[in-house]
Amino acid sequence: MKEQKNFVNHIRPGVVPSRALSVLYTFCLGGLSFLAFVVLGITGLLLMFHYQPGDSNGYDSILTIASVIPYGGVIRNLHYWAGQLMVVTLNLHMLRVVWTRSYKPPKQLNWLVGVALLILILFLDFTGYLLIGSQESGAAATVAVNILGLIPGMGTGLAQILFGEPSALSGSTLVVYVWHCVALPMVALLLQLYHFWRIRRDGGVRPL
Amino acid sequence: MPKQQDWTRRGVLRLAWVGVIAASALTIEPLVKYLTSKEDRLQSPLVAYNKPLDVNSDWQNTANARVWVKRDSLGVMALIATCTHLGCEVHYHPEKKQWLCPCHGSIYDIEGRPVSGPAPKAMPRVAVERKPDGSLMINTAKQVGMDTRV
């Protein structure tokens, strides 16, 4: 197949080699992760209509969404379980890439992009955990702030940027909310599109 | 069986699209309900009741589903029908003269005192105020004792 440099042709090529469709080679783990990401985006957008960030509001509004708002429980649980599922499928995806040695040239750059994506998604899960605003969230936020504080010189400032209040008790601060709902998903989406494009740019899936 | 050959891969996928669109259509009503719900808005603790209330009447529901009023020979009282166990809305059954919680089966007597089930205490009574025109104003934010009447 002639190599094309056009972005659209890589995302939706006219011809896909049949070897790239071998399900038992990839187990569609990357695709499943992306599906979970899409579900997370849609349900997350819906949750934003009723969720109220803030130290004292976060937990209450989660309870209200889950038990009072019509269908809120469904949407909240879909968001929660898609988040859990995505971490599982991403780790299996990474194990598959290691198993088939797909990190080797010419795909070494895409491997690094994938690692960055994994870390981004873990941060998304963590900030989502903080937004619940429960006591566990508060404990998690305290641990994270304390770890950041160990970085000499810039630790406190970094905690301020990432969590708003370094002494965040519930973790459900406006800063965490913005990271979780806007900044991290945007970066993750752009990196994912690059990740997918890069697969075909590097010659597609090639079973051994 | 020539019919079997009509099912091409393209035909099946097309039918799948119809299924996807039909399933999406089914989500419209839940989505509208979810997005238009105002149940998490801040609400005034005051609930008005302006219908006539006879002496020794049974519990009457107000505009707020969880606020009920009743009048006995001593006066008017108001009750919040929220289960003291986990906060479900408790339903009044006039034929049994009992309050039943649908969640975990707590039963309260007509006065709202727990009879059986996991409910630990009586449902709260709240303050009632009689306005000059005879209607009632219930302040759900202000709890009062079981014997308070207006």
Image: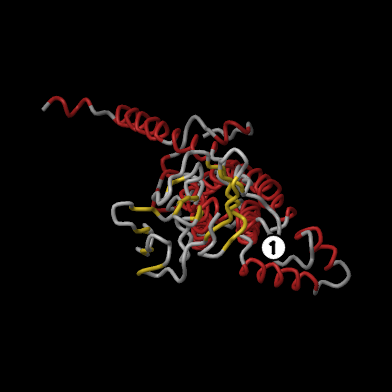
> Front-most of A139 and B19?
A139
SS at badge 1: loop
According to the image, label 1 marks what residue?
A: A171
Above or below, comparing residue A191 to residue B102 in the picture: above
> Front-most of A144 and B2?
A144
Above or below, comparing residue A172 to residue A153 in the picture: above
Residue A166 figure quarter: bottom right
**The disc numbered 1 marks a residue on which chain?**
A
Number of other residues with Cα within 10 Å of mark 1, as a class: few under 14, some 14 to 19, many 20 or more? many
Residue A4 figure quarter: top right
> Front-most of B38 and B73?
B73
Left or right? Give the position of A98 relative to A28: right
Image spot of residue A142 (x, y percent): 71, 71
Q: How many marks?
A: 1
- Asked if residue A88 can be seen in this view, the reply is yes
Residue in view at x 59 percent, y 38 percent: B133
Left or right? Give the position of B108 relative to A204: left
- In the orientation shown, which residue stands out farthest toward the front? B73
Image spot of residue B44 (x, y percent): 63, 46
Left or right? Give the position of B130 relative to B21: right
> Front-most of B113 and B42?
B113
- In the orientation shown, which residue stands out farthest toward the right? A153
Question: What amino acid is labelled 1 in the image?
Answer: Gly
Image spot of residue A109 (x, y percent): 66, 52
- Asked if residue A202 can be seen in this view, the reply is no
